[in-house]
């Protein structure tokens, strides 16, 4: 049987005027906070490296979804985190980018350095991106790729080799602003395979 709200307030009103009721409520709140604090502290893993040393992990694998489907998979032979945790270097990096749940592009690089504060990254050492699907194969090779997150700027300061279908483009350097679409090439040659 339900007690009307008015009767319930009338029953507990005298208890709410006593100091001991408020003391018990404060003690419950304090112990709830203390329990949360201790449990969350126990659940946080302790640092496995001293604050002045880098942390290295081997055999890294990860993946992410986009709109409920597999978006990409990533692996690296090893990763090293800086002592302050602001940068991570992935060695022997490999990734697959998926479209409609199927592999579309693959990427390899000897090393990828990511600034975790800004999400800027540098890929170096034989950066290679190629398509694995579609009628016209695409292939992109260079030594260094720099990504600047805020302006959405992709820069390749060293020579770039791009092939699309039977067409080959080689340029001394490349810069693409993905936000504005502005593209800058260095000295460039284009060969058509048709």
Image (tube, rainbow, N blue to C red):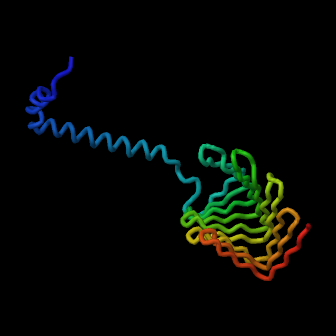
Q: Quadrant of the C terminus?
A: bottom right
Q: Nearer the viewer, residue 145 or 88?
A: 145
Left or right, 29 with reference to 143: left
Left or right, 164 with reference to 114: right
Q: Quadrant of the N terminus?
A: top left
Numbered circles on residues, count = 0
State the image coordinates of residue 112 (x, y, percent, origin top left): 70, 64
Left or right, 39 with reference to 122: left
State the image coordinates of residue 22 (x, y, percent, origin top left): 16, 39
Residue sitting farthest toward the top: 1
Q: Quadrant of residue 11?
A: top left
Q: Residue at x 49, y 47 (%)?
A: 44
State the image coordinates of residue 184 (x, y, percent, origin top left): 70, 78
Residue sitting farthest toward the right: 194
Q: Quadrant of residue 141?
A: bottom right
* 169 vs 130: above or below: below
Residue sitting farthest toward the front: 194
Q: Residue at x 66, y 60 (%)?
A: 80
* 131 vs 167: above or below: above
* 67 vs 2: above or below: below
Q: Nearer the viewer, residue 151 or 37?
A: 151
Q: Residue at x 36, y 41 (%)?
A: 35
Q: Residue at x 73, y 60 (%)?
A: 91
State the image coordinates of residue 56 (x, y, percent, origin top left): 66, 57
* 39 vs 46: above or below: above
């Amino acid at each position: 049987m339900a007690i009307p709200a008015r009767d319930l307030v009338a029953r507990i009103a005298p208890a709410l005027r006593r100091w001991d009721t408020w003391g018990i409520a404060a003690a419950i709140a304090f112990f709830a906070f203390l329990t949360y604090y201790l449990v969350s502290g126990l659940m946080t893993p302790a640092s496995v490296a001293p604050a002045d040393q880098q942390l290295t992990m081997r055999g890294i694998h990860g993946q992410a979804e986009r709109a409920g489907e597999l978006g990409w998979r990533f692996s690296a032979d090893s990763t090293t985190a800086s002592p302050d945790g602001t940068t991570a270097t992935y060695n022997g990096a490999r990734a697959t980018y998926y479209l409609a749940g199927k592999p579309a592009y693959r990427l390899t690089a000897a090393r990828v350095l990511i600034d975790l504060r800004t999400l800027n990254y540098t890929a170096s050492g034989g950066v290679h991106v190629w398509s694995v699907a579609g009628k016209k194969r695409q292939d992109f090779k260079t030594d260094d790729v720099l990504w600047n997150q805020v302006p959405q700027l992709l820069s390749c300061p060293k020579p770039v080799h791009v092939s699309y279908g039977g067409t080959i483009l080689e340029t001394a350097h490349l810069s693409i602003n993905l936000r504005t679409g502005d593209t800058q090439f260095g000295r460039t040659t284009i060969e058509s395979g048709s």
